[in-house]
Amino acid sequence: MSPGERWHPKKEEPTRRNFLLGGASALGLGMVGAIKLVEESDKDHWDDDAAPYTDASLEKPVRFLELAEQKREYDTGALAGRQFGYPISAYLGTRDRLGATTAVDFRYRLAQMWKEKAGKIRVDEVQRAALMRSIDDIVMSYNPDNAMSMSGAYYYLELVESIKQVRDEIDWGKIHSTFRLSGAQDALFRSFEKYIDAQTLLAFNLSEIMPSQGSSTFKVFDTLLKTGGYEFIQRIPSGGDNEMSFGPGQVTAKIFSEEKNSRGSVAIMSGVLKKRDMVTKDVAQLRGRQHHMASYLDALFNLVRLVQKMPDAQAAAIMNEPVGDDVRMFVSGAHNRPSDAVDSFRRFAASYVIAREHGGQARPRFTTFCTKQIAPYVERTEANLAEVRLQKGMS
């Protein structure tokens, strides 16, 4: 999905609502040059005045379709004086300039976003009722009054723990045999895999659910975590596609597919886990750390497919080179268009080897070789990664 189309169980869960609410000082918020968040858009893609979604196949209206708005005040001091367009206006329910506090009904906001999303998802009449029940559970299982309030710094730790949990369950030898990797390809895969880390996933999450990049984007994300909470971020639907897709990684139903001829990345990679049921097989059931685990497994699959395409000589030549950030950006690009990202990285690797063999040439970068379909998104993620690295405790 192009950037323009996007709106884009804990080790000890924080106490509800007020844990780390005042922890902004721990973030060490910084600036990335003159990068500025887009404050207004030509069109807010969420239409609050649209008629409620209805469907004749439903026996009775589901709860989220009939929610009444009940706002309460939240601390938005970090964003005071700012005015935002889409998608932030959809998250906070206002296009007005924010004050020290802002009145929001976060569950109602989710309901409005999911109403529009429901009308886009392509399913037949039989599947429609089940889809609406799933959406109803996603929205109504969220309670803003006891949602987990956390800082961006704590969210980063959630990513660290999520990745560790799933990594500990991987049978690495099974990846080697399942994908028939050569020795050089397997070694390259293992050296690249370590770059699928919390920094990578956080930069990726920012690019998925925020409209731009830089310090303002991180401040908005941090504010949403402290107000709507961790569970709100987990339930944001993707507005730019017609699939069942949502959450901080905006993962789609297709990566969970068990269909013989179109098995998804998470379905395939679950086969190399010691606990195969560690991640749900139903995208609509994703909750908590499973969102991050699914994003990690999808990235892992794309990384395997990349090294499969690289000849042994090329794999050996680039394995010990400082290409960590190039791999991180590949992960971001591959989430959107895997084949484009693979082709782009292969061109980058070939150029890199040539530059190394002809000493004195500047080292090329992956972003230079990205196709026009993934380049804007990768560049945004690169800027978000730089911002993440400015935060305290995120290294």
Image (spheres, grey):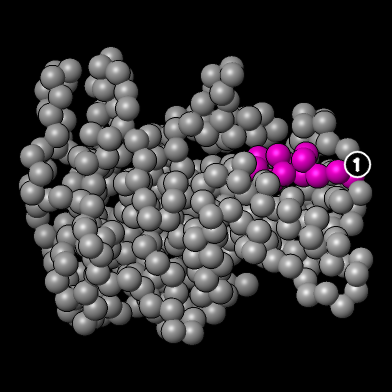
Residue 178, image x, y percentages: 77, 29
Q: Tell me if I can see residue 206 in this picture.
A: yes
Tell me if residue 184 comes above or below residue 387 in the rendering: above
Q: Tell me if I can see residue 164 in this picture.
A: no
Between 259 and 138, the one lying in front of the other is 259
Q: Is residue 304 highlighted in magenta?
A: yes
Residue 227, image x, y percentages: 28, 65
Position of 6 compared to 345: left or right? Answer: left
- Quarter of the image for the C terminus: give it: bottom right
Q: Quadrant of residue 166?
A: top right
Figure disc tally: 1
Residue type (three-letter) at the residue carrying disc 1: Gly
Q: What residue is shown at x 80% (from left), y 62% (from top)?
A: 352
Position of 132 compared to 170: left or right? Answer: left
User: Mainly helix, strand or loop, the magenta region?
Assistant: helix
Residue at the top extreme?
126
Position of 296 compared to 102: left or right? Answer: right
Q: Which residue is mark 1?
A: 183
Between 177 and 145, the one lying in front of the other is 177
Label 1: element kind: helix
Q: Quadrant of residue 266?
A: top right
Q: What residue is shown at x 20% (from left), y 40% (from top)?
A: 115
Start-end of magenta stretch: 300-312
Position of 278 compared to 24: left or right? Answer: right
Q: What residue is shown at x 62% (from left), y 49% (from top)?
A: 341
Residue 287, image x, y percentages: 42, 43
Between 193 and 323, the one lying in front of the other is 323
Residue 386, image x, y percentages: 56, 74
Q: What residue is shown at x 56% (from left), y 23% (from top)?
A: 262
